[in-house]
Amino acid sequence: MNSVFRDGVLDFPFELVRKYNRPGPRYTSYPTAPHFDPAFGPEDFLTEITRSNAGEAGGDLSLYVHLPFCRSLCHYCGCHMMVTHRPEKIEHYLGYLEREIDLVSRYVTPGRKVVQVHWGGGTPTYLAPEQIERLMGHLDRRFTIAPDAEISIEADPRGLTAAHLEAARRAGFNRISFGVQDLDPQVQEAINRIQPEELVASATEMARMLGFSGISYDLIYGLPYQTLATIEDTVRRVIRLAPDRISIFSYAHVPWLKKHQRLIDESRLPEPEDKLRMLLTATRLLTGEGGYQFIGMDHFARPGDSLAIAQASGTMHRNFQGYSTRAGAELYAFGISGISQLDGAYAQNILDLPTYYQAIDAGRSAVYRGYRLSEDDHLRRHVVMRLMCDFKLDLTDIERRFGIAFGAYFADALDDLRPLEDDGLVHVSDTCIQVSELGRYFIRNIAMPFDAYLKRSAVNAQPRYSRAI
């Protein structure tokens, strides 16, 4: 991924940033969440689960648990979270979470292997150590978790203790993701996340000593007061700490969706071209002296990491947590806002606690909206996801798999790709669509022409999505 550098000097056509920096999805699903329908409710979800578990149907499973609580508000946050300092509120939520797990697991064929578990939030490590063990124990009793399952937890180094990490290891967690974001003091103050490097280093060392097989860091570029110099400093310091994976996300400033982002001084946010320079600088450092492999969009991994291996073997997948190693596994999500991904449908849980509790008390699934995929959706999801994960598309394979003539079926999309091909972002032949190394930085734009829903709602895209750069 060094073709945008010539002898170590940045050589990038920044006029393309101005051309292609428009709102668009990150494609953690297709169709994307704004197109989910409230007409799809709890009974529809249970019908879809029953169908996916009928007879000998159903392959491997992935589980997601949403733990929304945090001890303080980070001004940049785009997650579904809430601040609380009341332990009893967390304990109350855990009781309902266990009841939701009980309800859904009754519909799952015994013996279906769970190959991936992820806890996100919020801050999962805001739970007490005994609560971490209790909740994972409950999942283990209700599902068949494979011995080699990838079991990961998101963690905030602030307030994290050895007892939390020890409890997580006893519970079976083998991967941990630390929210780092940025190591510059001025940036940390602006986003209300004071987190010295020493704190991150200490948490990382504790995790290593306890035997976590994979350590990931989340970084963000495009935050207030960030500059090329501060990003370079943060990335170099992160390289020295040597996590196995690094995600460096573009900050999505969407104050019309996340009201607390109004606490950020917009005049201190970098311009789109400067944001891309930050990503390019981080990429140069990570893939050069850092020795990481560029996975795609915003993910990096050590060459021997399972994510890098999955990409090389063509088994990488994309879901609501980003890039994933376990393609083909149906995803069941628990807790408020969680999104399940079955083979034929998506289903999102209720967003607020009182309504979530009412649904569980009534013995219903917590789903409040969803989407049942059509044949066209299945086809387009495959196209979009392979582009996002593989950066190429075997048109012959798609024609064989779905029984279509690709050129005729996607004639409008191929027309829309021509300007991107002229700009060197993608090459289209009769048998393949190949994303160039330059095009990887615009992969969302390359996927968008295949999105039938985006075309229909183009005039409404601004409130729905962040910009591509």
Image: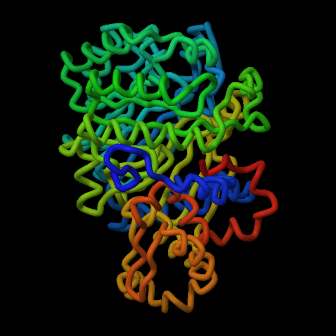
At x 50%, y 22%, the residue is 123
Q: Which residue is drawn at 76% across and 51% down?
A: 462
Q: In the picture, residue 250 is in which quadrant?
A: top right
**Residue 79's image quarter?**
top right
399 sits to left or right of 409: left
> x, y percentage for residue 135?
41, 25
Question: 383 or 15, which lies in front?
Answer: 15
- Up the image or down, 439 lies above or below 259; here it is below
Q: Can residue 47 be seen in this view?
A: no
Percent position of residue 181, x then y? 49, 25
How far from the left and from the top, in percent, is residue 437? Answer: 39, 60
Q: Which residue is drawn at 38% across and 29% down?
A: 217
How many numbered discs? 0
Examine the rendered structure and indicate whether residue 430 appears above or below residue 156: below
Query: 292 or 108: nearer the eye?
Result: 292
Rendering coords of residue 466 (x, y %): 67, 46
Q: How is the image coloured?
A: rainbow
**Would you place residue 364 above or below residue 225 in this image?**
below
Residue beneath the point at 47% across and 71% down: 426
Res. 315 in view: yes
Q: Nearer the viewer, residue 31 or 353?
A: 31
